[in-house]
Image (cartoon, rainbow, N blue to C red):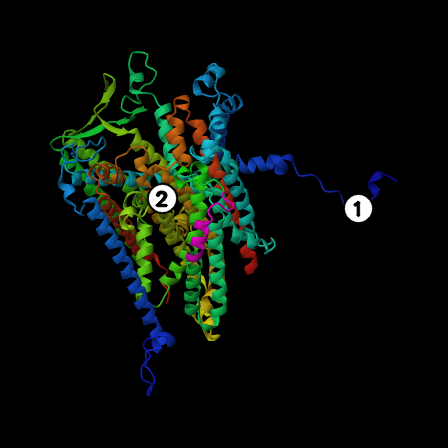
Amino acid sequence: MTSISPPRGESFTLSKLINDTRYRSYTFQFIALVLLIALFAYLGSNLAQNLRDAGLNISYGFLSEPAGYDINQRLIEYDSQSTHLRASIVGVLNTLLVAFLGCILATIIGVVVGVLRLSQNWLIRKLMSVYVEIFRNVPVLIWILIIMAVFTAVLPQPRDFRGDDAEASMLWDAFAFTGRGFYFPKPVFEAGSAIVVLTFVASIIGIFVYRSYARKQLFQKGRLLPVLWPSVGLFFVPAVLMFFIAGRPISMEYPSLQGFNFQGGIYARNSFISLWFALSIYTAAFIAENVRAGILAVSKGQTEAAASLGLRPNRIMNLVILPQALRIIIPPLISQYLNLTKNSSLAIAVGYMDITGTLGGITLNQTGRAIETVLLLMLFYLAISLAISAVMNLYNNAVKLKER
Amino acid sequence: MSKSDIAFVRREMLPEKAPPATAAGPIKWVRDNLFPGPINTIMTLLAIYFIYQIVSGAMPWFLNGVWTTSSLAECREVLQGATGGCFSVLTERWNQLLFGFQYPSEQYWRPTLAFVLLFVAVAPVLFVALPRKLLIFTGLYPFIAFWLIWGGTLLVPLVALIGLVAGYVVFLRVETKGFATAALTGLVAVVLVWWLGGYVSTAASETLALEPVQSRNMGGFMLNMILGTVCVSLSLPFGILLALGRQSDMPIIKWICVIFIEFIRGVPLITLLFVANVVLAYFLPPGSNFDLILRVIIMITMFASAYIAEVIRGGLAALPRGQYEAADSLGLDYAQSMRLIILPQALKISIPGIVNVSVGLFKDTTLVSVISMFDLVGMIRGPILAATEWNGVYWELWGFAVVLFFVVCYGISQYSQWLERQLQRDHR
């Protein structure tokens, strides 16, 4: 509209700013901009006035001051003398850890449940829809708190593992599930372990190379190479061989009961376990619905057409149904991952020290820097969600139906 | 004549034989649906075992449940070590669970009445078959509910209502002069009536007054209901405006809307609640005293309207372009074409999505317990589980919360599916 030049012989008059549709949009935008600036100026002046009254200022200097509190679950070195910035980084890593593990577990449960909801078996079908409906229709906060309460109340305490006829015992002497948390064996990397790890990485790269080679062979020469068993073999054999050749440089450190608690191994607190588990089964209920919808959306004619071309059932699934179903499933799946990441901020309810617990919790309370911490917190989550939606856009563009 | 000479000719059809027992009826159903193959048989047996475990665990717990004691210790005494639920925590703390612990107990009838009237008000919106006259009550309901729950003089909601009605009447009078002019004049009328009415209601603050209740005294499931209904209904108009803004040709307006929507959708609700709790006060004029519930309503409404805007944008995008062009070719201006042609259709398409967002939002109202408001979850975690009488009653309380939320959310989502089927039928 704005590109049309005004007719000849008509000069611009001020009233056209309201009455002429060619110019009216400029008027509206101008008014909107002025209102917006006025709003921000008003809020800003309030902020300045309030800060002056309270004798405060906006400063991020607190980030380099010692935090003075301890974080019990951490992935990197941290003690109470570390800075608030370091505490925030510990929180960020904890958030990413629970979100990453949650996405994996939620996908596994969700896909299994979604497929089982389409099963022939009436009982399984009904059981799965009961699961989906119960978990989708109750707030995730309640699930987190329930699972926390269940873990704490139902699982044995470390002291129950003591004595000769202990009430509880460790699984294979390696795993201990207690009300305080789970204990796992921890791999210890000794000298010479690097070559084993490198071999492992190289064999994973090899798998990808082999698969793309197999696909090229299929598309160019019509030769069908086996993919599954060579991949499995490549995954295990070189690394295991190298492990023994290098003289078994990786060993396991098992948790063991010392006094009233377990020592050694990896210790995952019950707050982490219950948050991880609750987020996973809550999100899995949504993912199951997406998976089901995606599979149902591929029309039956596709299966029949593929069968009439002479494809065998597993090839029909791999080459015809799955690529089409995945195109429908993956975008909502990614937004479920995003939801899971945002929901992980509820960690504060069970005391898991994620970014909301460190930066938005204790740091905020200790320093009183409400505006700065909440702003940082929002920027962090915003960055994550923008990154995830960028990935989603890339994927959508890659799988978009190419039309003429 | 021997028998063999007579040719046998059947003169009538044989009656149909019943199919074999294994190929029809319940046996066939069981074979087809429960035991169609070895893997399915194993899964069925596992499922039956699982269900048996749950039922055998839960039945005695329910049947032996104790409903009348006044503390956990007393309840355990009655049970004598047998399995059984101490449901007496629900009966004893019933009012706290529903209304919080500070709402005056002799006034419980007011939120209850407001809750019952909510169904009357919502019914004509949900079911098109009901008489349209009921919509008048729906329009009046927010004012009645405000008066019932918060108390104070009836004049305050009355003035608010009169202001809105006056604004609408003025808008209708001036509408021929153009939408923007009419909307602006209507707005002036609303503000004028409210300003004048403010004097009247402060002067006669005892007229038809109920005992006023402070916002901070609200709690329990009532708080979840208040937050849910208020924020959903407020976020609808904002959501529509944001969606239209995002579709707009005007770059500045479009980008304001895009940034707002993407920002809100990118952060978790809990950070917005932190803003309401500790940050928002810095941005309000010095000395102003917004109560927490109002700040929370503002933030949750912003949150919900961003999500609703995206749903409605989907509805707008799903409309065929011909509808926009047809509206233009009729000579309708932007406001008219949106109000008369586009929005009625787009909103109809997006109703299921809006309902889904509302369910999600209602579930999210439990997050206010994190900023120490005492909604249902906050009541359970705080005053009830911390009380010496009931320290340790997890299953009964959380089970109650699960049941309450499940009933509401499952009901709404079933309604949404029903509506989707109705709307589909209309299209064909």
Q: Tell me where residue A254 sits by quadrant.
A: top left
Residue B186 visible somewhere in the drawing: yes
Frontmost residue, B67 versus A345: B67
Q: Which mark is residue B291?
A: 2
**Residue B172 drawn at (x, y percent):** 50, 67
Between B280 and A72, which is closer to the camera in this rendering? Answer: B280
Q: Amino acid at mark 2?
A: Asp
Q: Is residue B90 above or below residue A261?
A: below
**Looking at the image, is A182 positioned above or below residue A239?**
above
Q: Residue furthest left?
A: A191
The answer to whether B6 appears left or right of B68 in the picture is right
The chain letter under disc 2 is B
Q: Residues within 10 Å of mark 2 (few under 14, many from 20)?
A: few
Task: Name which residue lies at 40% across and 35% down.
Answer: B377
Mark 1 or mark 2, which is nearer the start of the sequence?
1
The CA span between labels 2 and 1 is 88 Å
* Residue at horizontal 21 percent and vertical 46 percent from the top: A53
B14 relative to B132 in the view: left or right:
right
Screen quadrant of the C terminus of chain A:
bottom left
In this figure, which residue is indicated by the disc labeled 1?
B12
Q: Amino acid at mark 1?
A: Glu
Residue B8, position as x, y percentages in the image: 80, 44
Q: Nearer the viewer, residue B422 or B364?
A: B364
**Residue beneath the point at 32% across and 77% down:** A3
Residue in the picture at 32% in, 19% down: A169
Q: SS of the residue at dot 1?
A: loop
Quarter of the figure with residue B362: top left
Magenta range is: B195-209
Q: Is residue B120 left or right of residue A23?
A: right
